[in-house]
Amino acid sequence: MSIWRVLLAILFPPLAVLGKGCGSMIIVFLLTLCGWVPGVIAALVIINNPKN
């Protein structure tokens, strides 16, 4: 996990998970619309997932 990707996840969560697939980006975008904190948490969890 890159420090740049973490900073991007904090500033704009949907853009940080762009490489993980369209579904992940949509989920993070919807969570970001509900609130900034849920979007950031979801982005960090998706970025830290070792399976992808």
Image (cartoon, grey):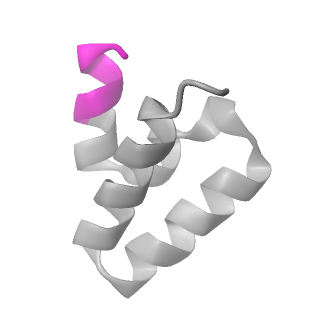
Which residue sits furthest bottom?
34
Q: Give the residue displayed 23% in from the left and 17% down from the top.
A: 3
Residue furthest toward the front? 51
Give the residue displayed 46% in from the left and 75% down from the top: 31
User: Where does the N terminus fall, quadrant-wise?
Assistant: top left
Closer to the camera, 17 or 47?
47
The residue at the far right in this view is 22
Determine the residue positioned at 67% across, 27% down: 52
Q: How many marks can you see?
A: 0
The x and y percentages for residue 6 are 27, 30
Most distant residue in the top direction: 2
- Magenta stretch encompasses residue 20: no
Q: Position of residue 28 (x, y in %)?
A: 52, 62
State which region is magenta: 1-7
Q: Give the prevailing secondary structure in the magenta stretch.
A: helix
For residue 48, which quarter of the picture? top left
In screen coordinates, is 24 left or right of 5? right
